């Protein structure tokens, strides 16, 4: 049953992200959620965390809703995906204002969600610092702030994420 949950999540996310590509590499978008899931697999995790990892961007970036996630994968996965979905909308103001609202939302997230968020930060930071040094300045500042509310996530991933941020600033 557990493996099926993760396999179903992979199929759902692959379908939902169909036709989308990664901004810098042009590779199919699904590569990123799968990488996030693989990072989560390296630390203590549940099948629900793996499903949420692969589904973490579907509500933000596709037509899928949290209701769809609940119907397909149950309450626990829906709760994790809800924690991982930014709540800000363009009408909330500039990027700084929106990121602040998202930070408050993430601060209230479950420790399991914070573990997935750390994996997402690890995956995204590599791509952004390599391909967009100008945006990386803004992005890494946001991630440094985000780390302050992710301390309840997995300690191994927290240390990896913190090293990425610290290394960026020591250049």
Image: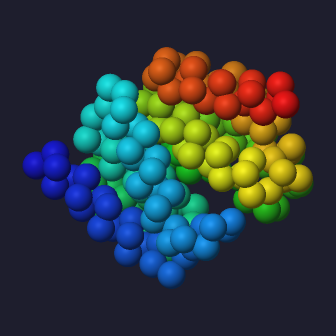
Residue drawn at the location 28% of the way across and 34% of the way down: 46
| x and y percentages locating residue 132 in the rendered image | 80, 56
Q: In this rendering, would 149 be left or right of 76?
A: right
| Residue sitting at the far bottom | 19
Residue drawn at the location 52% of the way across and 67% of the way down: 29
Residue drawn at the location 65% of the way across and 24% of the way down: 162
Q: Nearer the viewer, residue 148 or 21?
A: 21
Q: In this rendering, would 81 be left or right of 87?
A: left
Q: Nearer the viewer, residue 87 or 168?
A: 168
On screen, 158 above or below 130? above
Q: How is the image coloured?
A: rainbow
Q: How many marks?
A: 0
**Residue 125 sits in which quadrant?**
top right
| x and y percentages locating residue 129 in the rendered image | 75, 47
Does residue 95 appear in this view?
Answer: no
Does residue 33 appear in this view?
Answer: yes
| x and y percentages locating residue 155 in the rendered image | 49, 18
Q: In this rendering, would 31 be left or right of 22?
A: left
Q: Nearer the viewer, residue 43 or 127?
A: 127
Q: Quadrant of the C terminus?
A: top right
| x and y percentages locating residue 104 in the rendered image | 69, 33
On screen, 75 above or below 158? below
Residue drawn at the location 50% of the way across and 57% of the way down: 32
On screen, 156 above or below 7? above
On screen, 46 above or below 10? above
| Residue sitting at the far left | 1
| Residue sitting at the far front | 171
């Amino acid at each position: 049953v557990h493996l099926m949950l993760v396999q179903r999540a992979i199929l759902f996310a692959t379908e939902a992200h169909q036709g989308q590509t990664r901004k810098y590499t042009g590779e199919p978008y699904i590569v990123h959620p799968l990488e996030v899931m693989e990072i989560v697999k390296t630390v203590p995790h549940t099948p629900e965390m793996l499903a949420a990892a692969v589904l973490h961007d579907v509500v933000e970036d596709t037509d899928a809703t949290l209701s769809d996630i609940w119907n397909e994968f149950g309450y626990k996965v829906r709760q994790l995906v809800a924690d991982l979905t930014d709540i800000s909308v363009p009408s909330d103001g500039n990027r700084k204002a929106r990121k602040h609202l998202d930070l408050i939302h993430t601060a209230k997230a479950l420790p399991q969600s914070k573990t997935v968020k750390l994996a997402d930060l690890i995956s995204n930071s590599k791509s952004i610092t390599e391909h967009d040094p100008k945006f990386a300045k803004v992005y890494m500042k946001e991630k440094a702030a985000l780390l302050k509310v992710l301390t309840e996530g997995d300690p191994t991933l927290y240390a990896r994420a913190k090293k990425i941020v610290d290394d960026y600033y020591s250049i």
